[in-house]
Image (cartoon, helix red, strand yellow):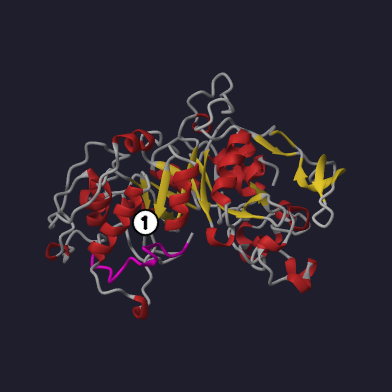
Amino acid sequence: MKNLFSVNFSIIALTILSFSIYSCKEKTQTKKYTYKTIPLEKISPEAEKVRDYVKMDVIIAHRGTTFWAPEETEAAFRWGRNMGADYLEIDLQRTKDGFLLALHDNNLQRTTNIEEVYPERKNLPVSEFTLAELRELDAGSWFNTSVPENARERFKNQKISTLEEVLKIAEGYRIKRDANNNPVKLIETFDEIDSATNKKTTITKWRGRYQMEPDLQDNGNRPGVYAETKEPQLFDGIEKELALFLTEKGWNINSPETLKKAPTGDEYKIAYTKGRFILQSFSPESIAKLDTYLPKIPKCMLLWYDDDPAKIPQDSLVKSLANAINYAVKYNCQIIGPSISGPPNNYNNLASPWMCDMYHRAGMLIHAYSFDTEEQLKRYNGDYFYGGISRFENPNRKVNTTNNYKIQRSLFIDGGFTNLTDLSLKYYHRPVDKTAQEVLTELGY
């Protein structure tokens, strides 16, 4: 998720103000800034309706998980679903032959064995490969080496996922496999046009798609999907293609005639609500295009602070954040996605209480990224202002500190991206029937 958000194609951030809420004795310099009074646009009444499609305190399974299973593979997404995530987070890319993928890296060396399979093409971007070519890669074994404490034999030969598969997993499906645990190929008949002769030929072949089947280990959770247009400048037209694809697959709420209806009993589960799909991007250009092609779908403007002194603009951080907020409001974003500090990522903090107050003043939800420790959950939910007591433990908790803030709900987040859905569930005091490891074992890994 790490990236750079810019407004008017310039970096938004100056110096992060010195503020920490690990202690109840903190002091802040924000008084000399005008974060309380700087003009901010507010989302429209129509955008408020779309915002309210998204419930509070959502748990967003970042790439399914990067901690318990190989990221953005079937194993990670099935785990996120069965563990109890509200959303499965994905990064969108596109193959050479036009299939939409759930994949983070544009270069395939970190998470696949491309150096072995296509050594002469190892440095090529994803867009230079067809889906069938990408399916030849092992996207799971690297995890067993990188995270040996969580290694599992069945992670070997996990495949790069398509957006289609993620939607089906959210609906309770899995990839169909043969007796040797190999994915069953979907052989298709379709028309292909020869680019040289412009002649149409009907052919039958495998294009890289797999057959799907109801997941016998499905536990009934129906998460939504939270999709980032990743490096959209590399995939011209991806926003329009996404809109067409979601319409075809019954996930575009702008198309009621094709919208997939909930099976009996699933009517209020996220995958069948108006908040079933959330869009996100660091790219201002992509945000504008998403608003054009997928209106009335919740959108999140992701924020990132670049601390390279050579790139720091002269304006204050308050003004820069205001510019970012106002841009997001202009293109009907209902959510802001700021980075948080702390291990293992050690990102810069764009979710301090005064910053959250600005985001909320514009009428937005705050989905921060990414939560990997209990300390982070406590910090950004404001527990240290309340003697360490979580609002999920005691909704009537009392302020237990003196500081320069008027302590209130608007200073804290409304949900977050996490690699540890199990940790967030426990912190939010939501039911957890099985451990992360037990869920993986039950799923057959």
Residue 215 in sight in this render = yes
Where is residue 20, by image quadrant?
A: bottom left
Q: Vertical placement of 343 versus 289: above or below? A: below
Is 246 left, or right, of 361 in this rendering?
A: right
The picture places residue 60, in percent across and down from the top left corner, at 47, 46
The picture places residue 198, in percent across and down from the top left corner, at 81, 51
Residue range corresponding to the magenta coloring: 2-19
Q: Secondary structure at mark 1?
A: loop
The picture places residue 202, in percent across and down from the top left corner, at 86, 41
Dominant secondary-structure state across the stretch colored magenta: loop
Residue highlighted by disc 1: 338
Q: At 32% from the left edge and 57% from the top edge, which residue is drawn?
A: 324
Is 213 left, or right, of 93 in this rendering?
A: right
User: Which residue lies most toward the top here?
Assistant: 264
Where is residue 166, by image quadrant?
A: top right
Q: Is residue 439 located in the magenta-colored stretch of the structure?
A: no
Q: Bin the neighbour count of mark 1 within 10 Å (Cα to Cα): few under 14, some 14-19, many 20 and up.
A: many
